Image (tube, rainbow, N blue to C red):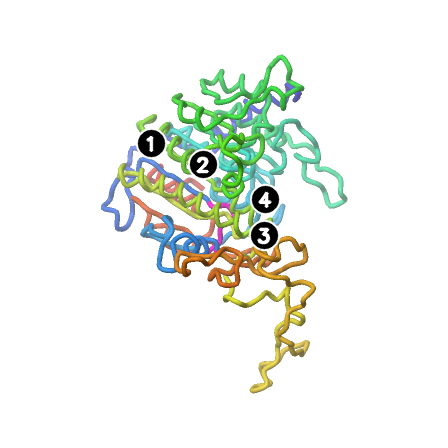
Amino acid sequence: MRHTTLKVLAVFAAASAVAASTAVTASSTPRHGHGGDGGREIHNVIYLLGDGMGRTHVTAGRERYYGAQGKLNMEKLPYTGAVATYAVEKGSDRPALVTDSASAATAWASGVKTYNAAIGVDSYEKKRATLMEQAKAAGFATGNVSTAEITDATPAAQFSHALLRGCQGPTYSDAACLPKNADGGYEKAPADKTLITPIAEQIARNGTADVVFGGGLARFEPDDQQALVQQGYQVLGSFGDPKSPTQNAGTQRVATRADLDKAHGRKVVGLFNRGNLTVEAAKAALPANAPQQQEPTLAEMAKKSIDLLDGRSRKGFFLQIEGAQIDKRSHANDAAQTLAEVKAFDDAVKAATDFAKRDGHTLVVVTADHECAGFNIVEKGTYTNAEAAAPPSNTDSGNPANNSLPSRATSGDKDRSRSTGPVNGAGAGDAKNFAPATFRTPDDPKGVKDGSLEASLWLTYLSGNHTGADVPIFAYGPGAARFAASQLNTDLYGKMYGSLFGRAPRA
């Protein structure tokens, strides 16, 4: 069990975070859109993130499911731009060119650049108010939805504050919650104990999000459910038997799609897996009676959260929706599962935009926190540098001024010990195989199969980690035009704040 002191501090610190944050009151100024939207008033903001989704993820998803001339739902939105994603080094403003999800989510949630692994604090470990906290304090309804554990970095950055993203719960540990000093020892515990309070504990007590859907049931304990119920939440499933708090795994019950369908409360929490939700490609391969088949899709969670939030407050609502598994399957270099997760996320985009079109006063923003794994589309029939017997030539026989060092030539041949065929075809069982994964598209002749040399979509990865590439952004609705720019991820905070409150945030 956790320490009672931390529980009490979590409650008071959460309240203090909002009180000490940028002062927010209901603006008497109508919230109008900007640019090409007829000046319609903005009531709601739906912010959707494809975690790890770079430009190539979008292109590959389009070509896989709709063909070269088709479009994903997000690509049909009228305004597009790009977002720079870099983080900063801890204790400074010096750029760290490749971000993680925690620092990226803090950037758009709180408007500050911070160090990788930080949640809701700046690079100097100072707590920063989040947009969801500010919206909640001003009377908006709020929601947070993810296919990851709800305590994971992206959702956590809207309704918690932690020095390290790993401080998820259910219990505290120095290793998970305290950064290390240069000498390898742990930093001194901060005066603000919220920053080392497990994220699950904060979520269950601060009431920042009215609707919470995702995974991560194992992060919570029976007293978390009690705290939620005392605040008026309808809890789907069960966080465990209060009489057997040390036997959580045996007494917890994940929520199901049926529970989601019946949810009706003004405040609802539903956790549909003890860990991350099951990836769509894996779920499709399971028998119909498998427990994972009872998990809702991201689109279903998106629709239900909108239904629950719409009309709940006269102010409107702010909702964040994350398709988390694009990133997790890109880390694994599993192209088939990556593509299926792009499609599942895009289905949620459609659910959001369908509502926005009916409503007329909803801004929809679709983007990513960072690109993951250097996902690339390569020419059909080609292979990667990792498969080559020698690297590409850096000599130019026609113009020696173009040569570079070291000077080398290439054989143009594959290293047969590292190339046995398409990775999701004949070479899938060989751990040394670096060949591209191949997929049929709607443009391919009938009979062409995934994993074949004839399939037209050839995909490969640069690494198993994040990259520093800019990510795309798409927007629809009143105020959408302001997102059609090349911008920093911190700019998104100010633009969404302005959409909700009709003015810029105070410095």
Q: Which numbered circle lies on residue 297? A: 2
Question: Of label 2 and label 3, which has the lower sequence position?
Answer: 2
* Residue 185, above or below 250: below
Looking at the rendered structure, the secondary structure element under dot 2 is loop
Looking at the rendered structure, the secondary structure element under dot 1 is loop
Q: Camera-side residue: 236 or 184?
A: 236
In front: label 1 or label 4: 1
Q: CA distance from mark 4 to mark 3?
A: 31 Å
Local crowd size for mark 4, using a 10 Å CA cut-off: few (<14), some (14–19), many (≥20): many
**Residue 349 placed where, x, y %?**
38, 43
Q: Residue at x 62, y 76 (%)?
A: 393
Question: Of label 4 and label 3, which has the lower sequence position?
Answer: 4
Q: CA distance from mark 1 to mark 3?
A: 40 Å
Residue topped by disc 4: 123
Question: Of label 4 and label 2, which has the lower sequence position?
Answer: 4
Q: Which numbered circle lies on residue 333? A: 3
The quarter in which the N terminus is drawn is top right
**Residue 55 placed where, x, y %?**
46, 56
Residue topped by disc 1: 316
**Residue 8 placed where, x, y %?**
59, 20
- Verify CB contact (< 8 Å) between mark 4 and mark 2: no
Question: Of label 1 and label 3, which has the lower sequence position?
Answer: 1
Looking at the rendered structure, the secondary structure element under dot 3 is loop
* Residue 246, above or below 462: above
Q: Camera-side residue: 328 or 388?
A: 388
Q: Camera-side residue: 223 or 66?
A: 66
Residues shaded magenta = 50-56
Outermost residue toward the left in this view = 38
Outermost residue toward the front in this view = 447
Q: Amino acid at mark 2?
A: Thr
Q: Amino acid at mark 3?
A: Asn
- Verify CB contact (< 8 Å) between mark 2 and mark 3: no
